Amino acid sequence: MAKTRAGGGEGESRGCGEPDGPDGRELSPAEQVEELLKRAQNGFEVGEPVLDRLRTALMHQTELRSYRQRNDDRRPLRCNTYRHVFLLADGSSLLLYELEHDTGPQERFLYELYTHEDPLDAAERRVHDRIGGGGIGPGSEAEELPAWLAEELLLAMGPTRPRREYVSEASPDHARRLLRRAENADGPGEVVRELLQGALGHHIALITKPRRRGAGRDATWCRFYEHAFLLEGGGEVSLWELEHNMTADGRLVCEVYLDEAEAEVAADRHARAQGVEL
């Protein structure tokens, strides 16, 4: 079984979701972008318009997308692909794909960055050809990341309710934009809209949920965000955003609910309608 280990030294793979700072602290999204560019062999291929958006991200999360490992050579050969999810200030998400492998002449990991899946797929095929047949991962009996391992990795990524740090700037405008994006008819009503016009602060959190994935290539996008609002008198109200592409045309949509369980039920309903497994 392929394993990841904490640490960033030569010859070691990073643990999924581990802090990357030299002092052990978790990097800010902007610092994470710089670290990705610093270690990538092809960082110059990432366009400046993409980098400008990434450097303003509010949050960052790393997910293990796929892996490959072969141990029957003179040294282990490994290939891991990470999906870096950046939450932007406008509420949208932006992805960077990082390919990590040790198929070079030296026993250390090399890194490549991609903004789209097609060039990433070509790079993975190139690295898998170097690894050769056999081993664990694509090209063997275990075609993709096993569902139980994906769940285990998500659970190991830490608490799902980070400490809230309210931002006091333009919170009513954030509430208006969020509710305006929502496409579900059963979302928060006018009473909630009026209540949030007096919000004193807001906090956005990407909620990590251990969701199972089926076999084969994972093309399903499903993310949960908690938008917490601080009200006068110290009260709090949370809106739960479901962002997904489980639509007839694969279009990315936003839905907003007053209750976390309602957002979960909606995600499961969309998945069943499209015949996909979360």
Image (cartoon, rainbow, N blue to C red):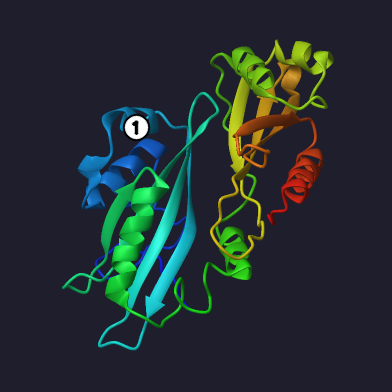
| Quadrant including the C terminus | bottom right
Is 265 displayed left or right of 61 in the figure? right
Residue in view at x 59 percent, y 37 percent: 205
Q: Relative to residue 262, is residue 179 depicted above or below?
A: above
Q: Relative to residue 166, is residue 145 depicted above or below?
A: below
Residue in view at x 68 percent, y 23 percent: 230
Rendered image quadrant of residue 116: top left
Rendered image quadrant of residue 77: bottom left
Is 271 displayed left or right of 18 in the figure? right
> x, y percentage for residue 42?
22, 49
Identify which amino acid the numbered label 1 is placed on: Val
Is 194 displayed left or right of 49 in the figure? right
In the picture of the structure, the residue carrying the numbered disc 1 is 50
Residue in view at x 72 percent, y 16 percent: 196
Given residues 191 and 250, the one toward you in this image is 250
For disc 1, the neighbor class at 10 Å (few under 14, some 14 to 19, many from 20) is few
> What is the secondary structure assignment of the residue under circle 1?
helix
Residue in view at x 25 percent, y 51 percent: 40
Rendered image quadrant of residue 256: top right
Is 146 displayed left or right of 20 in the figure? right
For the question of whether residue 47 can be seen, the reply is yes
Residue farthest left in this picture: 105
